[in-house]
Each structure stands twice: as structure tokens, then as C-alpha cells.
Amino acid sequence: MTRIVAGILAAALALAAHAAGPKIKIEAGGACVAPTPEMRRNHMKFLFEQRDRTMHEGIRTARFSLKNCVDCHASRKTGSVLGEEGFCSSCHAYASVSIDCFECHSPMRQASAR
Amino acid sequence: MIPERRQFLGLAAAAALAPGLSLIELARARSPEEAASALQRWGLLVDVEKCADCDACVTACRDENGWAGHGHPATDSQWIRKASLRDKRTGYAQTLPLMCQHCEHPPCVDVCPTGASFRRADGIVLVDKHTCIGCRYCVMACPFGARSLVHEPISGQKPDVPRGKGTVESCTLCVHRIDRGERPACVEACNREGGGAMTFGDLNDAASEIHARLRSEASTPLRPDLALNPGVRYQHL
């Protein structure tokens, strides 16, 4: 009995959390450059390390490049990762983490991208 | 001692592996995971005599790097400009493209308090805008007036050329194009629409056109008195 109550409670909590959570819409499909839990936890580290490699050494591998992220994750409607349903901004707004990348970098996917 | 030996072995191996390819081609087609190397030194040669009365280089740079102004000439960014020279006595007038000279001993790097202004291994002088605090010491230190501070909020940046308010910027020698194995946009435009005055290449590569011309024709850097050894050199100035 207690187990069932706990189960219902957990399901309700999960539903509530889901309703209030960010809208993550991935339109490109397919696999990301790393497993999702790893990306959720470490995407900022990957981007940070790639940033210095590209800037100072001219290493431009696509895997963790910001351009690659944007090309895949930008909304097909707006072409951007920002905005209410933007892949980056919806989550960052939910987590209340300011995101500085797009002060300078383009949030728009390139026309030639997938 | 060791790096030279390694470089030699690397080159020897490359030559042995690919007898059909020349070393220049190997050097140009740097793969994305390979770091820029001091084996190369990118440079430009500008023949002022051939420099036509046009601004193809400026327009091409603006389009490529997206630095179109806000209509405020005093503060708008200027990565490259056409400078006019006139001999006061004889009236002889010349015009030349002026941009970051990509010095071997860049004053902008010397004065930068955060290390944002730096020189890449292959000689390209850049601003790491992630660490630039917008103090503008480099703007003042540059003897060529090549740097600009971004004064106004920017949107619609090119994906390859991030730009932002409060950071300093200048000619990057189209580093994103060089890393793809292409020539800078100004050089492309000058040879396509202009007078064909600009030559781009690797100053260290004995087989390159720019190396051959610098070896056999007279040229001069701007402000040779400062001994900065710029990567950009001029002819018939």
C-alpha cells in the first residue's frame, strides 16, 4: 500500500516538474555528440575548452564547436537557439543561468546546415 | 634541438609518404584538428602601383566579417581602409589598403593587460574577445591605427566572425578562411575586381609566390623604423 502511494506521489511530482520544466525541442533528431546526461552536465566545459583551442591554436574540429551546436539545435521555425522555445534560452531561463555566448556569437543556424 | 629534429622528421615522413604532393599543399591543407604552427608565417604583399582607385578590398572585408557601421564614422569599426598618400611638393598621389600589419613584435600584444591580444603561432595577430576588457590600450599602442572598439550593441553577426560591444577588434587576416585553406576576402576581391595588387601566402614557404617575389623584388614594411617586422609588406611605396 505504502509502495503504491509512494509511486503515485513520485509520478505526480514528475508530472509537476515536467509541466514547469523547460521546453526542450530537438528537431534535428539523431544522436548528439556525446550521451545526453554527459551533455547536460558538461556542455559548458566542452564549449569552454573548445573555445580556447579554436581561438589560440586554430583547431576547428566540429564536434564541440558552438557553430555545430547551433546548426543542429536551432529551431526550424525561427532558425535560432534563442527565444521562448529556443534550445539554449529555454533551459537557461528555467535554470536562471545567464548565457553570454550569444552576446557575440550568432544564435542563428547557417542556411547551408542540415 | 628536439623540435627541429621532429619537424625535419615530420617533413621527411610527409615527403616519403606522398611523393606526388608537394610540401606546400600539405602545409595549406591543415586538417581541422591540427594546431596552427610556427612553420608557417602568413603574410601579404601589396603592390601600391597596382592598387586601383577602388575599395573592393574594404567592401569584401566588410561583407565577409560583417562590420558594417551604424552611421557614426567617429566610432564605427574599421578593419581595413584605403589610405591616401600625397607628396606635398610634387602632388604625386598614391592609395593603399591599410589594415592590421600582423607584426612579429606587436605593440598591441605588449600592452594588453589581460593577454587578450595575442599572436598565433602562424603569425596572425588576434584579439581573444573572451578575455578582452575593452581598455583600448592596444588601440592606442598600434602605430597603424588598425584597431577599433565596438561601441554599440551588435546583432546579426556572421557565424564565423563573433563580434560584441565593449571588445576590441581588427583584421584577423580572415583567420577562419585561412584555417579552411582559403585566401583572405580582401585578396580575393582585389584579384577579382580590383587591380590585382594583393598577394597572400606563407612567408616561410620557399615555393610560394609571395616568398619568390619578396626574394627578387624590392619591398618595404610600413614604419620600418619601429622594427616590428610586419607580415604585411608594400611595394612601390
Image: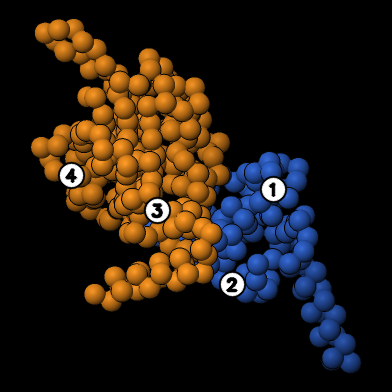
Chain colours: A blue, B orange
- Please say if A56 is above or below A107: below
Q: Are marks 2 and 1 on the same chain?
A: yes
Query: How many other residues sit within 10 Å of disc 2, few (<14), some (14-19) or many (≥20)?
Result: few
The amino acid beneath tag 2 is Arg
Q: Nearer the viewer, mark 1 or mark 4?
A: 4
Residues tagged by mark 3 and mark 1 found on one chain of the structure: no
Mark 2 or mark 1: which comes first in sequence? 2
Residues indicated by labels 1 and 4 sit on the same polypeptide chain: no
Q: Which residue is mark 1?
A: A113
Q: Which residue is mark 3?
A: B130
Observer-side mark, 2 or 3, equals 3
Quarter holding the C terminus of chain B is top left
Query: Is B196 situated above or below B136?
Result: above
The residue singled out by tag 2 in the image is A41
> On the image, which quarter does residue B232 sit in?
top left
Circle 4 sits on which residue? B228
The answer to the question of whether label 4 and label 3 lie on touching residues, with beta carbons closer than 8 A, is no
Tell me how far mark 2 sits from mark 1, CA to CA.
26 Å
Secondary structure of the residue carrying numbered label 2? helix
Task: Report the front residue among A80 and A5.
Answer: A80
| Image coords of residue B54 (percent x, y) | 41, 17
Q: Is residue B171 visible?
A: no
Give the letter of the chain under mark 3.
B
